[in-house]
Amino acid sequence: MIDGTVNIPIGAEKVYLFDSTLRDGEQTPGARLNYDEKVEVARQLARLGVDIIEAGFPVSSPGEMKAVQAIARQIKGPAICGLARAVKGDIDAAWEAIKEAEQPRLHVFLGASDIHMRHKFNMEPAQVLEQGVEAVKYASCFTDDIEYSPEDATRANEEYLYELLEAVIKAGARVINIPDTVGYAVPEEFGALIGRLRENVSGMDKTIISVHCHNDLGLAVANSLEAIKNGARQIECNINGIGERAGNASLEEIAVALRIRQNYFSYYTDLNFSEIYRTSRLVSKLTSISVPVNKAVVGLNAFSHSSGIHQDGVLKNKETYEIIDAELIGGSAAQMCLTARSGRHAVHDQLIKLGFTLNKEQLDIIYEHFVSLADKKKEVHPEDLEALVLDHLSAAEPRYKLDYLQTVSGSKSVPAAVIRLRKEDDSTIEEVAVGTGPIDAAYNAINKITGLNIGLEKYSINAVTHGRDALGEVQVYMSYQDRTITGRGTSTDIIEASVKAYLNGLNKLLRINGNG
């Protein structure tokens, strides 16, 4: 069993980890992050030790530009990358966002498959090649760290791909990324493609070959590992494998596979493995995307054993049924519990251990919430404290805040709710509504206040810790017109947690739409 001891094989080559959680990962339906959430995830990715953070797509919105700029200014260690289509306006926006980073990188992309050229752009292959070359040359005016992606490369004409890549390398691209944009490839085929590109593209030996695999056929991790065997030295991946459609290659699965199977893969990463579990939890909580219980490496059941035979074997020797030590990924870190008698210093110390960097104003707010929670609970666990911080991050700049809540329910009464919300201008609006239950009634009252007909697609609740006084964490999937939004909220009161989650999603929606 592999533990936390670093043991790099002799002659091993480094694989660079390019994390796209804040860009492609945030494209998961409903997984919108606000400014503070994006910066906090970036901080954690830096602690995790990824090599490159793709911080976003700056031209997409002013809010995205602002968040990427903040990440570029504040996050030290990893290179900070901005995505741009192969047009000057996108490149200008991306550079404006990342130019203050220690290591800024521009990532330029343009479709390369016949189906993309014909149906997305209505362009001829020669025109796409020319546009790609001009974009790389223009990006070279700002930095020499340029990555180029021929989108949908695995469905492109291979001879054309050779010609295109040779041209953009001559124009100044230092990293060539081969995206399996729709998850079409299978491992042996994908690995062979990477090998042929190395052999047939002039100048490829002077670049870093990267791959970006989607998981539509469940092969993203396998394709990425096969690409490494055939010469790829940068892997684009996301925490928990989140991303468009079925998601992207999972960062933690790739890194741990390389680590556990060092006898097979003669490669290494500079990842801080003890931060994997914490990073997974943070991304899951802030995006409101639960990690499947059977998810490799970070799932709840990854280190659980129900079979009597398995349990007997593990008790005798963990290596009988466990190939990964949970402590390798930081899954068994011992941390103290806090009580109502715990002071500000103890709370601050625990927050630092959890990996949060808070200013004095933020610490004051969190401590106030901690004191309130500690009055309700005998012990405040690290998970409780983490939930308080994430609630604060998620609630940044809300249009509506909960000011008052009262519900009525019972076996022989009509469920009803009184909701009073406080708006940004400090005015309040109150409404009464009925429903099939107290939570439904509360949601109906909020819809009456906002005038928005928001649908509830999915509702889930989990206990943050154990015991009758545990914080309840509610996650909701809400739909409005053509959008799906997620929200999360916590409280020792389940109805209050449910209302907080609904308001969290509502505020995200209003920020996106720019109304409210």
Image (cartoon, rainbow, N blue to C red):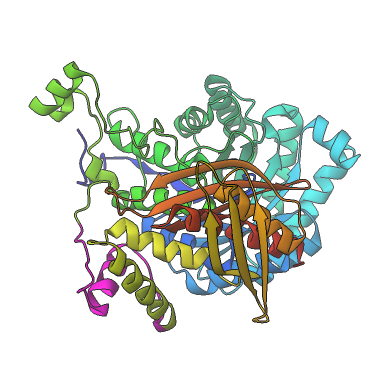
Side (left or right) of 148 relative to 221 = right
Q: In the picture, residue 111 is in which quadrant?
A: top right
Seen from this angle, which residue lies furthest top? 309
Q: Is residue 161 magenta?
A: no
Q: Residue at x 31, y 48 (%)?
A: 273
Q: For the magenta stretch, what is the residue range?
A: 335-360
The residue nearer to you, when weighing 148 against 179, is 179
From the viewer's perspective, tell me whether residue 35 is left or right of residue 75: right
For residue 432, above or below residue 214: below
Is 371 above or below relative to 150?
A: below
Q: Quadrant of the N terminus?
A: top left
Q: Is residue 140 visible?
A: no
* Residue 449 locus on image (x, y percent): 71, 64
In this rendered view, identify the residue nearer to me: 415 or 98. Answer: 415
Residue 455 screen position, x and y as percent: 70, 46
The spot of residue 397 in percent (x, y) is 60, 72
Q: Is residue 154 above or below residue 45?
A: above
At 59% from the left and 57% from the top, the residue drawn is 417
Q: Residue at 45% across / 30% down in the picture?
A: 229
The one nearer the camera, 19 or 110, is: 19
Q: Say above or below: 225 vs 479.
A: above
Spot occupied by residue 432 in the image (x, y as percentages of width and height): 66, 61
Using the image as rendered, state which of residue 3 and residue 41 is in the foreground.
Answer: 41
Quarter occupied by residue 385: bottom left
At x 22% / y 62%, what residue is drawn? 378
User: Is residue 348 part of the magenta span, yes or no?
Assistant: yes
Image quarter (top left, top right, bottom left or bottom right) of the C terminus: bottom right
Q: Is residue 407 visible?
A: yes
